Amino acid sequence: MPTYEYRCEVCKHTFSLVQTLAEHDRGKVICPKCKKKEVKQTVSTFLTQTSRKS
């Protein structure tokens, strides 16, 4: 499942959430610190892991 990074517009807390695509599309994310709904998704890095050495 993808990991999305968010930033709260109220308390400026940055946090990550592991969400399914359906959960992400619903967009109902709240800040775990202040419990407000004013959060925006931030640009994050992409990480991939393979099962064997290349």
Image (cartoon, grey):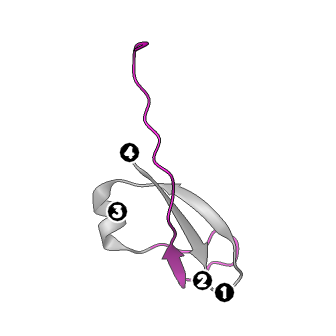
The picture places residue 53, in percent across and down from the top left corner, at 43, 12
User: Which SS class for mark 2?
Assistant: loop
Picture disc at residue 21: none
Residue at (54% x, 79% y) in the render:
39
Residue of label 1:
10
Most extreme residue toward the front, as rendered? 54
Q: Nearer the viewer, mark 4 or mark 2?
A: 4
- Check if residue 22 falls in the magenta segment: no
Upstream in sequence: badge 3 or badge 2: 3
Disc 4/disc 3 C-alpha distance (Å)? 11 Å
Disc 1/disc 2 C-alpha distance (Å)? 7 Å
Relative vertical location of residue 34 with respect to residue 22 in this rendering, above or below: below
Residue range (magenta) = 29-54
Mark 1 touching mark 2, by CB under 8 A? Answer: yes
Mark 2 belongs to which amino acid? Lys
Where does the N terminus fall, quadrant-wise? top left
Disc 3/disc 1 C-alpha distance (Å)? 22 Å
Mark 1 belongs to which amino acid? Val
User: Which SS class for mark 3?
Assistant: helix
Q: Nearer the viewer, mark 3 or mark 1?
A: 1
Picture disc at residue 1: 4
Mark 1 touching mark 4, by CB under 8 A? Answer: no
Relative vertical location of residue 16 with respect to residue 6 in this rendering, above or below: above
Upstream in sequence: badge 3 or badge 1: 1
